[in-house]
Image (spheres, helix red, strand yellow):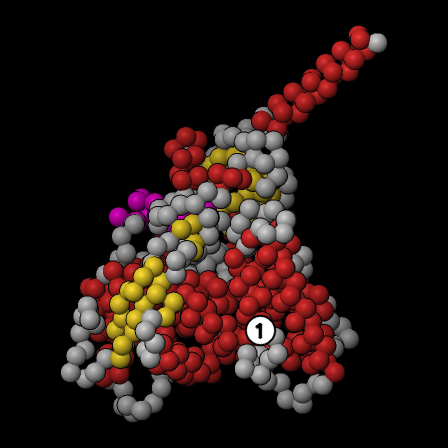
Amino acid sequence: MWSVSVCIAATLVLAVASWLYRWQHPTCNGNLPPGSMGWPLLGETIKFFAPNPTWDTPPFVKERMKRYGSIFKTSLVGRPVIVSTDADLNYMIFQQEGQLFQSWYPDSFTEVFGRQNVGSLHGYMYKYLKNMVLYLFGPESLKKMLNEVEHVAARNLEKWAGLESVELKEATANMIFDLTAKKLISYDPKKSSENLRESFVAFIQGLISFPLDIPGTAYHKCLQGRKKAMTMLKNMLQERRANPRKVKTDFFDYVLEELDRGDTILTEAIALDLMFVLLFASFETTSLALTVAVKLLRDNPRVLQELTEEHDNILRNRENKESGLAWKEYKSMTFTFQLINETVRLANIVPGVFRKALKDIKFKGYTIPAGWAVMVCPPSIHLNPDNYKNPLEFNPSRWEKMDQKGASKNFMAFGGGMRFCVGTDFTKVQMAVFLHCLVTKYRWKTVKGGDIVRTPGLQFPNGLHVQMTKKDKQNQDPTSKN
C-alpha cells in the first residue's frame, strides 16, 4: 500500500514538474523570442500592472527591452504574448490585418467592451461598422458640427471661470460626453431620470485594472458599470423603436433604420455594443489628452505663447468679428495640430495594442506562433531617442518637418492600418476648438493635482484642479502667473 502511495505521489510530482517546465519553456516550429513566462497562469501580469509615475516607457517594457531586445515573450492574464517594440514589426502587424494578424484583446477586455464590440469583429463586418461610424465622425459631418463644438466649449469655459477651481479631467469628460451622447442618442442629462455618465465613471475606474471579478475590486465595479449602461442603452433603443421619429436627428435613428432593413447584417447586440464603445472612446481618451495638453502648456510658457499667437491671429484676421470658427480657420491651425500630435505622443494614452497571429510568422530570426497574442507597445516607439530627439521633452515644433496626417512606423497614437482610429478627426476638432476658446479668452493656474500615474493606462490620481479667469483687453499676456 505504501509503495502504491509513493508511486502516485511521484507521478503527481513529475506531472507538475513537467507542466511547470512546459509553461516556462513553450515550444514552436522555430525560434521563440527570448523572455520569461513568469508564474504559471498568472504570468507577469502583476508586474505589467505595476504603477509608473513618469512619462517614460513603462519599466515592465523598458527592463525587458534591455535584457531581451526589441521583441520578447511574456505571459499576461493567462495568455502567452509576444511584445513588440520593433518599429518594423509594428508596421507589419498593422499593415497585415486580416492576412497575418487580426484584432484581439484579452478576455477581460472583451467582457467589459462586449463580445460583439467593433474591436473584436473582422473582415466585412468591421468595414461595415466603420462606414457607419464615418457617417457621424466623417469630415462632412464635422464641418456641420464645428460651430456646435465651439459653442459647447465656450459655454463650459465661461461656467468654469465662475468657480474657485475646476477638476479639468472630469469637467472636460462631462463636456465631451454630453455633446457625444446628444449626437449619438439625443441624450439630455437634464431630462433623463438616470445618469448615464455615472455608469461610465464606474466602468472607466476599473477598465485597465487587474481582472479579478470579486465584489469590491475595480474590475468588478467596471463590469457593473457596463451592465448598467447597457441596460439604459437597450431601454432607449426599445423606446425609440416603439416611438419612431419621422426625421432622423441622431445616430440612433440611423442605426434603427439599418436594423429595420430586411437585408441587414446588423444585429441589436452589435448595435448596442457599438453605441457603448463610441460613447466611451469619444470622451475618455479625448478628455485625457486635453488635460495633458493644458498641464503641459502651463509648464511650458513659450509653447503657450506660440499657440496663443496662432489663435489670436485667427481672430485678428477674421472679417466678421462676431462669426464663429470657419472650417478654413480650423484647417489653418498648423501649430495647434503639431501640439496635438506632440501631446498624444508624450501621453501614450493607449499603452498597448493587441493582435493575434493567424499563422506561424517568421520575423528577424524569430517565430511568432499561430494563436499567440501580440502586443504592440506605442510608448517604446514614441519615446525612443532614435525617433525623437530628447523624447521626454514637450516640443510641438519637432513636427514641422514630420508627417502629421496619419500613422507611420514611428507614430501610432491613433493606431494604424485598416484599424486607424475612425474618431481621430473628431478628437482633433474637439481638442483644437477647445484650445482656441481657452487661449484666446482665458488664463489659468494650477490649484492642486497634476501628477500622473500609469497602471498601465494613464491616470491623474489627484486630478488636475485649475482656476480659470477671463482675460481683459488690457492684460493679454498668456504666460502671466496671476
What is the x, y in percent for residue 449?
34, 59
Res. 411 visible in picture: no
Check the image and name the residue furthest to the left. Answer: 474
Q: Is residue 188 above or below residue 455?
A: below
**Residue 29 in which image quadrant:** top right
Q: Is residue 319 above or below residue 71?
A: below
Does the segment drawn in magenta span residue 77? Answer: no
Tag 1: amino acid: Asn
Q: Position of residue 213 (x, y in %)?
A: 63, 49
Q: Is residue 115 found left or right of 386 in the rendered image?
A: right
Kindly identify the residue that appears in the image at 24 percent across and 84 percent down.
Answer: 317
Disc 1 on helix, strand or loop?
A: loop
As drawn, which residue projects farthest toward the right? 1
Can residue 255 be seen here? The reply is yes
Q: Which residues are magenta?
A: 377-391
Q: Where is residue 414, by image quadrant?
A: bottom left
The quadrant of the image that shows the C terminus is bottom left
| Numbered label tally | 1
Q: Position of residue 123 (x, y in %)?
A: 64, 58
Residue, x 53% and y 49% (percent of image)? 209
Left or right, 386 with respect to 352, comes to left
Relative to the observer, which residue lies in front, 479 or 392?
A: 479
Q: Residue at x 69, y 18 (%)?
A: 13
Question: Up-down: is 254 above or below 118?
Answer: below
Q: Please state the horizontal and vertical placement of residue 465, each as a whole percent of the image.
A: 34, 65
Provide the residue designation for mark 1. 195
**Measuring 71% from the left and 80% from the top, which residue is drawn there?**
239
Q: State the predominant SS element of the stretch in magenta.
A: loop
Relative placement, left or right, of 399 versus 200 is left
